[in-house]
Image (cartoon, rainbow, N blue to C red):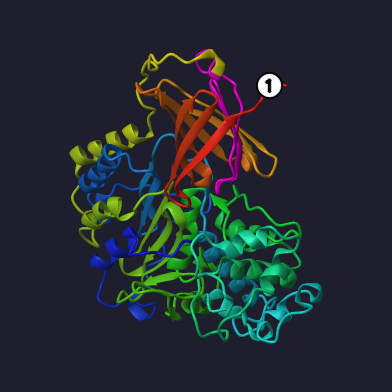
Amino acid sequence: MERPRRWSFPALAMALVAPASISFAGDQVPPAPAHWPTTHWEMSSPEAQGMSSADLADGLQFALAKNLNVHSVTVVRNGVIVLDAYFHPYAPEVRHDVASVTKSVVSMLVGLATDRGLLQGPEQSLVSSLPTDVTAGATDVAKTIRLGDLLSMRSGFDCGFKRGEPELRAMRGTEDWAAHALRLPTLAQPGTRFGYCSPNFHLLSAAISSGTRMSALDFARQHLFGPLGITDVHWPADARGISHGWGDLQLRPTDMAKLGLLMLNEGRWADHHVLSEAWVETSVAHHFRANEDNDYGLGWWMPHRLPGLFEAVGRGGQRISISPGNNMVVVTTGGGFEPFDIGQYILKSVRSNAPLPPDPANQSRLDEALRRIAAAPAHRSPASATVPGRLSGRVYELEENALGLRSFAVEFKARGANALTLGLANGDTLVQPLGLDGRYRITTVEGGAISAGRAEWFEDGRLRIELNRLSRINRFVLDVVFRDRDLELVVWEPTEFGTLRVRGTARKQR
């Protein structure tokens, strides 16, 4: 689940330099950008926007030294980009899974549909927004759920209280996801209890489809992504064509920043309002206490005691963080890291609301740091471990596991031709090239996402494989121990699975 356990870096960092009270009223509204980045972003030195190049360079160097699993950091102040950093092997032209940041986008789309009279807003009943074949048989309690209850995670469903989101997994195993979600058991009256339930937002996506007569993706292309110049998008749908409302949207980091800039400017883009000011204000009002550190609005998180600050949050480090008091948007993507580790440097870099004197020496340091994080590691010779010929290509059948892996094989061939092959529970096969020279090998997978792999032998005979899904967040580290005809995998993945042990047995030759 994507519940913040503490303030993430933009929230904490910006809050500490923000005015004591921030609101959308009067002179607190950020000035409109001189240039709207519909077709391209304007770039600026940090100093020209009151920020320190030295501190930003220190942050990037820290991330590199600590091998943080961050993919990108984008900082926008006063409508221009002051930092756009990409860590190898991730690259700026590649879309990234934004995880539950998707929920905040769905909230924006509900607002757009409401602005156009296609939905009736937060007070509309859920059942009135859905087709009758979906609502048939809905319980009396479910019939009282409003769209606002879903948006604020107060649906009343017995959902969102267990680790691992079992309700989401169960929903995805059915033929009609929306109908299944509507029939979840309830434990509270709608509007009374917070429960971080991802199926809530798939029901909202279904409501968007019903009200607009198109998928959330198509509606967004016309009325949200299109006006902002966002064209490179991937958003899968269920069997009924309903876009995944809880997650799986893929965007480029600079396009995530456009969504943040739209919210920062109260829904205004260039010379018109894409999203109504009223919807933005309603979305980031403190609707409900989510946990000891955060309130939750309509698909947006707000840290306690920090009025005006709000974030779209996804697992693994995906963030769009908006500070009206600093006229700033910060976007991060990653495969499992604590954003404050870099955010403390962004905090320190904010020195003034007025330009600082130029600092060419530290600007050069920042430029060099940007080059270093984007570069592939130096080539190294593969470890000299002897690979038994019988291991290459041998298929191991795996015991049942939470990863959904059914088989495992590694081919060791000529330089650059090594490959990991995983059989998946759904019948698909994943093939990932592996570098044994310290460098990733990159491949493109479904939907244009990219995946990277590398491997290393240790003197004790252990093989370590790094399967970095990049666009899809998860970075798996697999330690493989081969024992005669058996193997043991120790798999570590920080954002979703933790550490798992899986055993396998060599498949009998036919």
- Residue at image x 46%, y 61%? 2
Residue 470: image x %, image y %?
49, 41
Residue 494: image x %, image y %?
42, 49
Q: Nearer the viewer, residue 96 or 254?
A: 96
Question: How many numbered markers are drawn?
Answer: 1
- Residue at image x 28%, y 49%? 46
Q: Is residue 257 visible?
A: no
Residue 468: image x %, image y %?
48, 38
Q: Is residue 218 visible?
A: yes
Residue 483: image x %, image y %?
48, 26
Identity, as a three-letter code, of the amino acid under mark 1: Gln
Quadrant including the C terminus: top right
Is 130 displayed left or right of 273 in the figure? right
- Give the structural element (helix, strand or loop) at label 1: loop
Q: Magenta span covers which residues?
A: 391-420
Structural crowding at the residue carrying mark 1, measured as other residues with C-alpha within 10 Å and reported as few (<14), some (14–19) or many (≥20): few
